[in-house]
């Protein structure tokens, strides 16, 4: 008979849980609404907890017990016959008839209670929740109650700027106090932020903003100045106050200084000026491969989709497309500016643009190449920020052109047109390194291996040009290892099936004009009429140095491919740059060689050699003294002076004020990018300089700040003897721990 009571207890627990859920949904709705309104998660959390506690006290869902549950079931389950209360009474106190009725009710509840839902308002609470979230989100986006968030999130307004007297003997002087201080930030017009009045002396504003200060004192003062990183500017007296307005070009620090009627000088604390940079636009190209290839029969169109965003507004966006026609020395370029399909409205912060680039409309033919990128400008004044996307490539394949030059042509024409390919590999490798954190390991290895294959293909192309026909043959079944670690010719380690029909550029019989017999040496009958590649003076294609450079480039390409295959593109990149450098040198040398063979200098007259007078020629000697640049000299000197003062080996002297002044200026210049980081250190230096806090604690704090701000010296590789043991290592570790 206890089974029926268990059903009642489960129903009662469901009733309580639904009550708690209803209260939670109501509280969550009000909390999220407050968060959107105030833009402060702590305030939203506080409202959530407050409403939750209040509704729990009103609803008290824990008040549902077995008696109320029994009454509810009797009213809603006809089969219970108002006998559910029998399940709550001890079985010993019931008559036989009551026990029979209890058994009957227990069986009915077993089948009926599962279909009955306890009374609740969960659906109503869910509707209220989603309504409050939607309304709060809408109000947040529209900015109707943005002032509420500004008020709630604003830091406690600092009291008026405080001043202290500099080093003086007139301690009884009355300190003038500021009765009113107003700081106005005039943002650049293109930002559309307008003007903003603040009271917080630590200022953050967009670069090129104009900032105005107005100070009013309770007593008459004279000579009010504003100091910014060593520059002192007088403030103008207007309507009983002192005003000044300056442009925020770069981050820095500032303070105020004035004198009272007694001539006592007072100075304020240091405050930070942080110039928020206007970043260039951000360009995102969607779903477009960096390399696109078209066959002649394909529809030669590229669908370009991009998202452009800027922090304050976009001024102009377009596509720069360059069409390349021809090859080698006869290549020609044509650049065009393409507009997007959409109209660019100036001042928008986000744009979604599309463009269908038709290669036929650009009058591209077979073998032509297209390079294009997106260029975007913002509205920054006086000079716009510019951003450009990565360069994308498209080519119409030429399937009928011969890839190889004809023997006997001019040297520069024989040079293969693959100089850009190594650059492309470098671009792809750098892009892979950049994308490594955001892609999977499988994709990273796949792309690295593909780049290794492309590097191999490029190497084989140059190998063909060098005469390594065997490198295009089948892969050898066995690979020998060069234990010495020196470069070797891989083509010599395998049998070249085309040896009888191709040129042997590495042997003495370079062009394989006649067959080589082991027993006798056959004189080449065409020797007088063919190129002699072993003699640089007679070669009409390349000088020996070019061959050496090209062979060296091939060797470097081997290493570049190796690290790409090992999924280490970072190590492959230096080798790729080395190969590109050698290729460029070969290209430039080839051009110079053509010029050289076309010039026949006049012969030198033997009778005029080693003749003439040198009496009018004087010896030349130049003496110049160069001073070794010592960066942060004053900061280092200030650290040493502080060490002596802290160790009580010396006292603070008046000449030290100049040292600390220069040290403060050096630190201020060093802290331009992050003014708030060194604000306390600069304040400590100013206090030491003005004799307002020359204490051991301030000395140690300033010294530690200066040491942390000094750049670490460059590590110069070199051999040195360092004698350390376990005890010394533990000692150094303890020093670092308690530093």
Image (cartoon, helix red, strand yellow):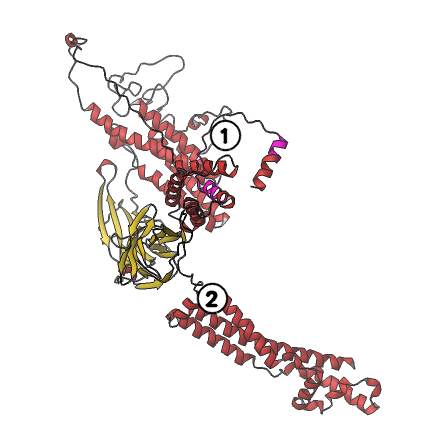
- Indicate the position of residue 368 as horizontal and vertical percent values: 26, 45
Report the front residue among 253 and 313.
Answer: 253
Mark 1–mark 2 distance (CA, rounded to whole Å): 67 Å
Confirm whether residue 300 shows in the render: no
As helix, strand or loop, the secondary structure at mark 2 comes to loop
As helix, strand or loop, the secondary structure at mark 1 comes to loop
Is 702 part of what is drawn in magenta? yes
Crowding near the residue tagged with mark 2, few <14, some 14–19, many ≥20 C-alpha atoms within 10 Å: some
Q: Is 652 situated above or below 600?
A: below
Residue 479 tag number: 1
Report the front residue among 313 and 296.
Answer: 313
Residue at point 42% right, 42% down? 451
Per the rendered image, the range of residues in magenta is: 701-730
- Indicate the position of residue 697 as horizontal and vertical percent values: 51, 45
Q: Which residue is mark 2?
A: 40
Is 29 part of what is drawn in magenta? no
């Amino acid at each position: 008979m206890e089974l029926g009571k268990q059903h009642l207890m489960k129903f009662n627990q469901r009733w309580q849980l639904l009550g708690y859920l209803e209260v939670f949904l109501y509280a969550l709705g009000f909390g999220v609404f407050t968060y959107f309104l105030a833009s402060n998660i702590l305030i939203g959390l506080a409202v959530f907890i407050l409403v939750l506690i209040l509704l729990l006290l009103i609803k008290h869902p824990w008040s549902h017990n077995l008696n109320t549950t029994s009454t509810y079931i009797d009213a809603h389950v006809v089969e219970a016959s108002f006998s559910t209360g029998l399940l709550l009474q001890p079985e010993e106190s019931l008559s036989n008839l009551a026990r029979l009725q209890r058994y009957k009710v227990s069986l009915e509840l077993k089948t009926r209670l599962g279909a009955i839902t306890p009374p609740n308002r969960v659906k109503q609470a869910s509707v209220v929740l989603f309504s409050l979230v939607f309304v709060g989100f809408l109000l947040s986006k529209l900015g109707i109650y943005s002032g509420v968030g500004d008020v709630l999130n604003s830091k406690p307004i600092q009291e008026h700027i405080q001043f202290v007297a500099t080093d003086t003997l007139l301690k009884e002087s009355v300190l003038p106090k500021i009765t009113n201080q107003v700081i106005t930030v005039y943002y650049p017009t293109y930002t559309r932020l307008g003007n903003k009045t603040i009271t917080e002396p630590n200022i953050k504003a967009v670069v090129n903003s104009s900032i105005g200060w107005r100070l009013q004192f309770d007593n008459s003062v004279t000579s009010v100045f504003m100091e910014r990183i060593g520059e002192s500017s007088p403030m103008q007296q207007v309507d009983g106050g002192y005003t000044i307005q300056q442009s925020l070009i770069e981050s820095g620090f500032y303070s105020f200084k004035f004198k009272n009627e007694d001539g006592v000088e007072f100075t304020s604390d240091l405050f930070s000026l942080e110039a928020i940079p206007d970043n260039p636009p951000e360009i995102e190209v969607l779903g477009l491969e960096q390399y696109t290839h078209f066959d002649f029969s394909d529809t030669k169109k590229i669908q370009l989709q991009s998202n452009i965003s800027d922090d304050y507004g976009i001024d102009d966006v377009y596509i720069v497309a360059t069409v390349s026609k021809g090859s080698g020395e006869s290549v020609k370029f044509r650049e065009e500016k393409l507009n997007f399909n959409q109209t660019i409205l100036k001042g928008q912060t986000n744009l979604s643009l599309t463009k269908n680039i038709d290669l036929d409309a650009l009058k591209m033919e077979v073998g032509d190449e297209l390079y294009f990128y997106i260029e975007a400008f913002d509205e920054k004044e006086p000079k716009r920020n510019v951003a450009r996307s990565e360069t994308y490539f498209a080519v119409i394949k030429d399937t009928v052109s011969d890839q190889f030059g004809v023997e006997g042509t001019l040297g520069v024409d024989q040079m293969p047109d693959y100089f850009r390919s190594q650059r492309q590999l470098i671009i792809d490798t750098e892009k892979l390194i950049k994308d490594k954190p955001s892609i999977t390991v499988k994709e990273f290895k796949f792309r690295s291996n593909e780049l290794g294959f492309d590097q191999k293909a490029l190497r084989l192309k140059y190998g063909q040009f060098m005469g390594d026909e065997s490198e295009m043959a089948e892969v050898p079944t066995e690979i020998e290892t060069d234990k010495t670690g020196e470069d070797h010719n891989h083509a010599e380690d395998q049998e070249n099936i085309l040896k009888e029909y191709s040129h042997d550029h590495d042997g003495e019989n370079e062009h394989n004009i006649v067959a080589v017999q082991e027993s006798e040496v056959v004189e080449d009958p065409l020797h007088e009429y063919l190129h002699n590649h072993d003699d640089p003076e007679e070669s009409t294609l390349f000088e020996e140095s070019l061959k050496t450079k090209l062979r060296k480039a091939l060797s470097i390409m081997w290493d570049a491919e190796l690290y790409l295959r090992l999924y280490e593109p970072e190590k492959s990149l230096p080798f790729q740059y080395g190969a590109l450098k050698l290729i460029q040198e070969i290209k430039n040398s080839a051009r110079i060689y053509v010029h050289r063979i076309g010039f026949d200098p006049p012969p030198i007259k033997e009778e005029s050699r080693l003749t003439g007078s040198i009496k009018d020629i004087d010896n030349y000697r130049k003496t110049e003294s160069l001073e070794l640049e010592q960066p942060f000299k004053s900061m280092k000197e200030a650290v040493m002076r502080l060490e002596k003062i802290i160790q009580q080996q010396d006292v603070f002297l008046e000449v030290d004020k100049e040292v600390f002044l220069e040290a403060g200026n050096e630190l201020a210049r060093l802290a331009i990018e992050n003014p708030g980081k060194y604000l306390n250190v600069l304040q400590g230096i100013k206090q030491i300089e003005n004799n307002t806090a020359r204490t051991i604690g301030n000395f140690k704090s300033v010294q530690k700040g200066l040491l942390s701000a000094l750049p670490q010296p460059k590590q110069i590789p070199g051999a040195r003897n360092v004698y350390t043991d376990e005890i010394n290592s533990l000692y150094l570790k303890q020093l670092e721990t308690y530093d």
